[in-house]
Amino acid sequence: MACQQTINHQVSKESLIFEAIEFSKMFGIAKSSNEQFVFTINNQDTNWYHLDKTQKNLKIVVLSSVFSAYLSELNCQKNIIGVDNIHYYNDSILLHQFNQGLIVEIGEDGLIDEESLLRLKPDIVVGSSFNKINTAFMKRLKLQNIEYIICDNFKEQHPLARAEWIKFFGSIMNQTIQSDSIFNVTKLNYQTILKTTNLNKNRKMVMTDAKFGDTWNVPGGNSYTAQLINDAGGLYIFQQKTDKFSYPLSMEVVIKAASLADIWIHTNQYKSLKDMIKVDNRYAFFKPFNSHQVFNNNKRENKFGGNDFWEKGVVRPDIILKDLQSIFSGDSNKNDSLHFYTKLN
């Protein structure tokens, strides 16, 4: 077994040495003289996992493509034996393994095929806290010595906090040197870009997203997306809405607040301005629509809608930040200069 969810009774928390975590507020790494632990924090609930460093070939099921992205950065795709839905995944090595029958789909959160999962006999299942409420499922995993590790990295609102979770996966995979190195490069790149954008005093006004059904969901001013916009040198149009998560607004409210924005990003499913205007001709009320300053983060989206922006991009926010800086500074006229984004025409 790779992990054990209770700390050895001979080791007290007071005797542990805690590794410095720079940005994340939701996981930690600790060690004693001869043992190592990782832990996750979910509100008032802390889950501890005792790492077995003798285990070399962990078998892992991931319930989100972003979890696989951390493992891919560590070149640990071979350890993945199960995923939720392969359509969400973009890593070419992992897709090749699936096509060879080395990876099995076991279903998404709330719809997991428990029998298929148990037949795989993984050492670890990595998922969100959503499944933790299914106590019968958790009990079945425990009876089979399968460790369920909670990864709620999506609740982190700083891009570098989400990226720092690679240290968590590095500890599990016994690759702490590699994970620290990857994160340090990401952090250095991100902060180097940030230094240049902080010199920009003439920031462009930025709006996001598009109408879905009858509502237009916009990120809060303290959200992951708002942080990226600010760090890339933009001025988020709804920065005064200080929540971390999304606000549902009407089209009329967005038109009133954002019609004079300079740049428009993250336009949901749209791939062209023509597609947008077909759905709702009021999109033409927005300045960036008419000035052709509309960009979507779907350049690396597969044919099923699985988007690498939410896979590798979470692990490497420095690449996203570079794209956004190019867009906001006007240096993105050529689509091939952007990694995750495309300009809508």
Image (tube, rainbow, N blue to C red):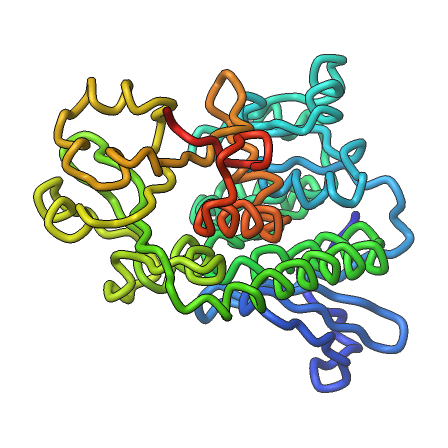
**Residue at position x 13%, y 31% in the image:** 282
**Residue at position x 41%, y 34% in the image:** 296
Please state the horizontal and vertical placement of residue 247, each as a whole percent of the image. Answer: 23, 52
Farthest residue toward the bottom?
14
Classify the position of the C terminus by image quarter: top left
When the figure is inspected, residue 177 is found, relative to residue 44, above or below; the finding is: above
One can see residue 108 in this view: yes
**Residue at position x 48%, y 62% in the image:** 231
Horizontally, residue 55 falls left or right of residue 290, namely right
Classify residue 81 by image quadrant: top right
When the figure is inspected, residue 74 is found, relative to residue 220, above or below; the finding is: above
When the figure is inspected, residue 20 is found, relative to residue 175, above or below; the finding is: below
Horizontally, residue 110 falls left or right of residue 83, namely left
Closer to us: 52 or 119: 52
**Residue at position x 63%, y 49% in the image:** 316
Horizontally, residue 338 falls left or right of residue 237, namely right
Closer to us: 123 or 297: 297
So how many labels did they put on this image? Answer: 0
When the figure is inspected, residue 160 is found, relative to residue 2, above or below; the finding is: below
One can see residue 47 in this view: no
Please state the horizontal and vertical placement of residue 174, each as a whole percent of the image. Answer: 84, 54
Please state the horizontal and vertical placement of residue 326, each as a whole percent of the image. Answer: 52, 47
Please state the horizontal and vertical placement of residue 119, each as a whole percent of the image. Answer: 68, 25
Classify residue 19 by image quadrant: bottom right
Horizontally, residue 107 falls left or right of residue 8, namely left
